[in-house]
Amino acid sequence: MAGMFTEQSFKRYTPSDHLAWHSLYSRMLPRWDRYANPAFLQGIRSLRLDPDHVPRLEDVNRFLEPLTGFCARAVSGYVPAFLFFDCLGRREFPTTITIRGLDRLEYIPEPDIFHDVAGHVPMHTDRAFADTLVRFGDCAHTAVDMVARIRDEQERIERLRSIIRAMARFFWFTIEFGLMRSAHGLRAYGSGLLSSYGELKYSIESRDVQRCPIRLQWVIHQAFEIDHYQPLLFIVDSFDHLYDLVGQMETWMREGKLNNVAPGEPHISEEDLASFLNCTPGLAVYMK
């Protein structure tokens, strides 16, 4: 686990990197005021992010940890699924430290520090939301415990693929692209929306988006694609509602209702699958 974390060397950031952060941050401010949920706006104020410079994670954590116990920890690349969820369970958020170039401000397929710190981390200042992320970590451990009891290797792998796919879909349609009701209408709380200048407005105002009250059975069977604006979004009533939905997903996992979710995206990589299998208690007894 320790090997996946790295140090954020602030000297590595160039003037162009800081300009990219400033450009992204400054143009998002009016969009956040118009379309972001109140907890996010409070989080932005609480973190006191510097609009002109790439943030130092130690400064972010100085304001974040006293609020919810969460901290942002630098990683150098992709974090496999189980390790990512396990970090959430320990109130650690794996945080990308690279930043997109000035020629790619509109969209990049992979996370960067703007997506992670300006999109995700302000939500981690809210206690109910933070507790929801911790419960995701519990779900990952529940999956590990369950597949450990399956003796047949192929059955174990297929069962786990389905469970990971269901968890990934739920995470996508809530933590990354979720909408919430508010006193002022629909507002975004998903980081994929809150870090995108174009899609944040599109998610609330476009007539091309189907916005549905969230239903667990719809979310876990709904495939998604990452390379275009999302045509389907789900609405929660509150973060307490979201917390209860994660608990419902864990209950369904125990009852076998995640064992055969609909095929399709996301593709579950061998790296993600191995991250669950390699920490399964007693796995060596069952695998050749």
Image (spheres, rainbow, N blue to C red):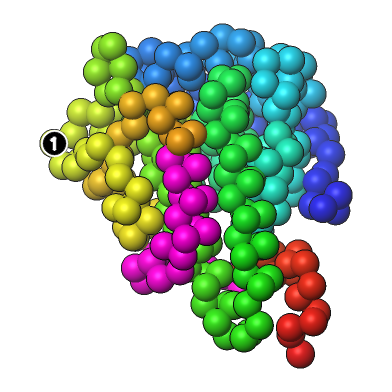
Work out which residue is located at the far left of the displayed protein and give it.
207
Dot 1 alpha-carbon crowd within 10 angstroms: few under 14, some 14 to 19, many 20 or more: few
Segment colored magenta: 245-272
Q: Is residue 252 magenta?
A: yes
The mark total stands at 1
Q: Judge by depth and name the residue closer to the eye, 39 or 6.
A: 39
Asked if residue 58 is positioned above or below residue 108 in the image, the reply reads: above
- Residue 279 placement (x, y as % from top left): 76, 64
- Residue 80 placement (x, y as % from top left): 66, 58
Q: Judge by depth and name the residue closer to the eye, 208 or 38.
A: 38
One can see residue 109 in this view: no
Q: Which residue is mark 1?
A: 207
Work out which residue is located at the far bottom of the displayed protein and give it.
288
Which of the 4 image quarters holds residue 73? Answer: top right
Relative to residue 189, is residue 152 drawn left or right? right
Which of the 4 image quarters holds residue 48? Answer: top right
Relative to residue 30, is residue 286 drawn left or right? right
Asked if residue 44 is positioned above or below residue 75 in the image, the reply reads: above
Residue in the image at 20% along x and 28% along y: 205
SS type, badge 1: loop
Q: Judge by depth and name the residue closer to the eye, 217 or 126.
A: 217
Residue in the image at 68% along x and 15% along y: 67
Q: Is residue 279 magenta?
A: no
Asked if residue 118 is positioned above or below residue 5 in the image, the reply reads: above
Residue in the image at 70% along x and 28% along y: 70
- Residue 195 placement (x, y as % from top left): 46, 32
Q: Amino acid at mark 1?
A: Arg
Residue in the image at 67% along x and 62% along y: 145
One can see residue 45 in this view: yes
